[in-house]
Amino acid sequence: MLKLIASRLATAVPSLIGVVIVTFLLTRVLPGDTAAYFAGPAATPQAIAEIRAKLGLDKSMPEQFVDYVSALAKGDLGSSLSTGQPVITEIATRLPASAELTLAGLILALVIAIPFGIAAAVKQGSWVDHSCRIITTAGVSLPVFFTGLLLVYVFYFKLGWAPAPLGRLDAFATAPPDITGFYLIDSLLAGDLETFRASLAQLVIPALTLAIFALAPIARMTRASMLSVLSSEFVRTARAAGLTPYKVIIVYAFRNAMLPVITTLGMVFSFLLGANVLVEKVFAWPGIGSYAVEALITSDFAPVQGFVLAMAILYVLLNLLIDIAYGIIDPRARAEA
Amino acid sequence: MHGVIDPATADLQPKEEAHGKLLEVKDLTVEFVTRNGLVKAVKNVNLTVAKGETLGIVGESGSGKSVTSYTVMRILDRAGRIAEGSIAFSGLDIAHAPESQMRDLRGREMSMIFQNPRAALNPIRTVGRQIGDVLMHHLQADPRNVKEKVIDILNQVRIARPEERYHAYPFELSGGMCQRIVIALALACRPQLMIADEPTTGLDVTTQKAVMDLVTELTRERGMSTILITHDLGLAAAYCDTVMVMEKGVVVETAPAEQIFRNPQHPYTRKLMRATPRPGITLKDLLPESEASSSTSVPFPLPNPPPQAGEGAGDALSVGDPLPLAGEGREGAAASAADIPLLKVENLLKEYPRQGVTGSFMSGLLGKKGDPKDTIFRAVDGISFEVKKGESVGLVGESGCGKSTTSTIVMRLIDPTAGKITFAGEDIGAIPAKDFAHHPMRRRIQMVFQDPTESLNPRYTASRAIADPLLRMGGMSGGAKMRARVEELASMVGLPGDLLDRFPHQLSGGQKARVGIARAIALNPDLVILDEPTAALDVSVQAVVLNLLEELKHKIGMSYLFVSHDLHVVKLLCDRVIVMRQGRVVEEGTSEQVLEAPKDAYTRELLSAIPHPPV
């Protein structure tokens, strides 16, 4: 298993180098002159040139690249031009916020989607199957900002069950000590149940919004994968041996059907992490998605590069996790490694 | 629903039947709901199995033999249902028993072993736990003693080192071993009835014999009844007391095994009997009597295979087609057909890194060198043979003997580690496999594959599949000329012209095999490699396809390299036979020599393992 992890990490190195190069080039070819943007509309050409020199933008591309990479090697991702903060600290505070939200949404989606998918496959053509189809279709076709706003309208505005959608904690609560960056976990570690409850209340509605979107692919994949496994020969053998439906469906069929579901899960997670910008906007969530989009609009290179790099690393780690999960579930994958 | 069941629950308890009948099926009709409406898969089937009896159900694909047995176990899929009739098992009404009761019966009182043992086992659960699941479910073991009991059962099915194998996954075991595990699963709870559905299809003949002998021994010593479902009359003859022959969902004949083979009554039984390859017959004998006598249009063996036999097709082929060496090869063949080898393989060697050798790549990088025997597996270990012009050579052996590797190397799909392959005077072994696809020699060697379904592109019509080599290497690009050539090829292989626009899933197995053959002969090759071309076909279709291959060989003047595990089939088609084992040639000679007076002990073992009807 350790060998597998080491070899996976080794194969990820070239793609990470590729990501560094491509993001560097991409941010340079994007339209918009950073120096002109920060100098302001009234700046003289001379002032713009000064700013450009200060930012190192007057150097040749290779020189800029060498500067970037050598800074990167020291763990320096540069500083955001608009906030003045180092990119690395911004990402360090914002990434856990996004990750907590995404994970919560994903877990919620899993809890709903997997039993649903299994039931839809086992009772193919029944009302469970049809309602599964309707809900998953609705889940993918309703945009997240719409479901988000709808949930806010119903649960905050109409029913008043949920707190105001204003970030991770309401204004009067203090953030728990920073250990993992996940408020739910940190507050529990600190034994602060009040903060735990408050951050959970903030999290429920945005997580539900994401879950509605994420459960569609997971439920569909679970159903399809279960259907194919249920018609396989070893399930027939298990039935012919008289095993109970529970044993046949959960132990024999579902464990085999999990493999494609896990692959889908990895894709859904990485997709959500970057793409939940809209949810972050609607709920004023201080996440990494909104940070990156704002930086992109202002041609602020450093945060964009930092964001893409962080995502790439995360993606590599995620794939590693999926491979490990595969190895745990499927002995054949272990043998190949 | 319950109202219907209630009267039956009165005698749900299994009870001894006075007349010793364990299973009695009366007037059984099974329907399937399909897109085209209700289809009756089994019609008015009657059968009885006495205690300790072995009943063979014999039939070709679509005969309803598997559906009958699944119905007895009540494991039909949801589209199927019992339309009429009754099934009594130990006096119990199976057709109306509640599902919970069926679950108790399955595995404990009646069990099943399946075709394709590897697929029949859960790939991600250790075999020990799978057997344990069955034992624990039927309360034959508890968590404390389950392992002990499983190992005991593994011992009974002759699994060596059972403690180790308890923790093995199906993919770590051989096919024969997997089938022993499936048998262990079926016998774990000592049921009264065991249904074996094609239990040895896909296994080697020697493994088949070992598995069937084991099943017979275990069922006999426990006084169990067995239903053996098979397409192989020889197998039924060797292992059954009574044989029931089914055709298209109907039982055509039921009789004691001895009687059904000595004196078959129904024409279909006779047709099956004739189509089963057995010692001392010729290809013609496989065909039904009526066809065998009528199809004398091509008397073979032809006295002299005409070199221009494929001339009718020749004009189409000559378009932009210089065919280097081809002319020379053919003329040479015509002059002295017997002497010049078309294909000469010398000291062919193919090595693979041994599977499961950890860090072979890393140790290679670090320059570490282990014992080559530990790290290298020789699939083909220095074999040499020749195929002469117009000759058919059989390459026989069990799985893993290297016969398919050899044929793949000759086809130049993979590169040999060492050795020389000379084809029509040119050293084609020296051409890298990846370049050979574009080499002019490529069109002169063609292949017919084992699985007629898998080897056809499902999105290509029959005519497109046949035209494929014409388009790629025949210098044709569609149009009336190509269509004419495709039609000509179709008529050569006996494929009706109106089937040409169908897709593979709309064709029967035999028709797909014909498409595969037509595709292989489209470019008038000199050598056709036949990789078990009939292994996936029913015996009656196999009979027709084998005869077709023989006929085409004489028409076109091809040579065959016939790869097979079945010596009797090989003997029918081939002039010479090469027997391989563990990458080496153990015996070589004419078909008569090898089959009638085998010199090597292994060949004798292979021959004796093939069951055949007592004719």
Image: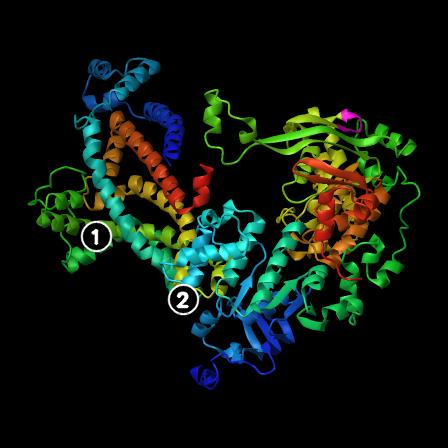
Looking at the image, residue B247 sits to the left or right of residue A258; the answer is right
Q: Amino acid at mark 1?
A: Ile
- Residue occupied by mark 2: B139
Residue that appears at 84% across and 35% down: B389
Q: Bounds of the magenta span?
A: B422-426
Q: Position of residue A116 (x, y in %)?
A: 35, 59
Q: Residues within 10 Å of mark 1 (few under 14, many from 20)?
A: many
Q: Are marks 1 and 2 on the same chain?
A: no
- Residue occupied by mark 1: A205
Q: Position of residue B425 (x, y in %)?
A: 80, 26
How many numbered marks are there? 2
Residue that appears at 48% across and 68% down: B108
Q: Residue B482 versus residue B128: which sits nearer the camera? A: B128
Tag 2's secondary structure?
loop
Q: Residue A293 versus residue A259: which sits nearer the camera? A: A259
Tag 1's secondary structure?
helix
Residue A275 shows in this picture: yes
